[in-house]
Amino acid sequence: MNAVMRYSTPAIVLHWLIALLIFAGFPLGLYMVDLPLSPDKLKLYSYHKWIGITVLMLAAIRLSWRLTHTPPPLPDRVAAWQRHASAIVHGLLYLLMIAIPLSGWLMSSAKGFQTVWFGVLPLPDLIGKDKALGELLAEVHKILNFTLLGLVVLHVGAALQHHFIERQPFLQRMGWGKKEPT
Amino acid sequence: MKMTVLTLLAALTAPMAHALEYQTVLPKQSSIGFEFRQMGVPVKGGFKRFTTQMVFDPAKPEAARAQIEIDLASIDAGSPEADEESAGKLWFNRSVYPKATFVSSQIRVLGNNRYEMRGTLTLKGRSREMAVPVSYVPGKNDANFDGGFVLKRLDFGIGEGMWADVATVANEVQVRFRIAATGN
């Protein structure tokens, strides 16, 4: 039997939704920080924060889904070290999906700007205005993001390697393409 | 008899003459702050340096006067980036208009230690008449004069050009002040 094991539909939807938001939020963050102050900059900062808080909420849902639903097993051919590596990278990706928006939220509070999700829902400031802490959190936010970039490269690289080089129907696990006939 | 009446009058008016007249402002206990919305986010700021000249006698409130001069360079606009931006031509144009002034013209008694202070606010070369509610809060040796009003920044050309878009930075700026003063 050659049945393709897929993640559950909610897991697949959350994966791609969060991926899309990260692929929008990351370059937006890189671009906006060096802009001179303008209304557009203020808008982009808000959009970036709204994206981040959305990721945080979706990641929380996704994490609870993951903890209550077993993912499909990896194909037998996947080597033991790759299984370990995969578990570590997935664990870190989950951690960063939570930690990065959280560090941004805290940074915003420390810099004296409350985060108001979509301009409507004000999030509480968990810490007060503190210039030095704001700068530290900006650095933390940046480092976490570049760590995420590295992990995403590994994650995507591994999936493509399994799929195209080892010729295993790997991307189908995340809903890519049609289910192969069993 | 004449003498008695005069003595009586003198006795009655003497306490008036010695009534507390607030005229020495305590800068450290005084503050001017503001709050506005930026992309729906409340941003707080204020001015650290300003001078106030005032005379207020609770017995003769209509005769009260106040004059406030704000050093716009002492602004806290919420972030260092915004402080710097606010000096520019589109905002305060501070090199040409370094100060904001308010000069009172008339005081109206509202009751319960509340007054309406009318006067002229001059900002960026533009003057506007305004009515500001002020509460008189007497303490042991000093008193606070607390007030607030909503300033529409575009009335004074604060935030022109690209910044005139009120969807990004709201037109309404809530101003709050406390002037602390002692008598004599």
Image (spheres, grey):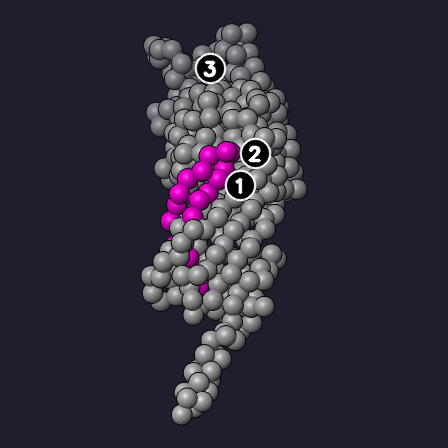
Which sits in the foreground, B146 or B169? B146
Please tell me if label 3 and label 2 are on a single chain. Answer: no
Residue ID at (66%, 42%): A132
Number of the front mark, 3 or 2:
2
The answer to whether residue B96 shows anywhere in this view is yes
Q: Position of residue B121 (x, y in %)?
A: 46, 43
Q: Chain of mark 3?
A: A
Q: Residues within 10 Å of mark 3 (few under 14, many from 20)?
A: many
Q: Position of residue A18 (x, y in %)?
A: 44, 25
Quarter of the rendering occupied by the C terminus of chain A: top left
* Residue furthest bottom in the image: B1
| Residue position for label 2 | B97
Q: Inspect the image, locate mark 1, and give the three-letter code of the amino acid beneath it.
A: Ala
Q: Chain of mark 2?
A: B
Check the image and report above or below for B100 versus B147: above
Q: Inspect the image, locate mark 3, and give the three-letter code of the amino acid beneath it.
A: Phe
Residue range of the region highlighted in magenta in the rendering: B119-136
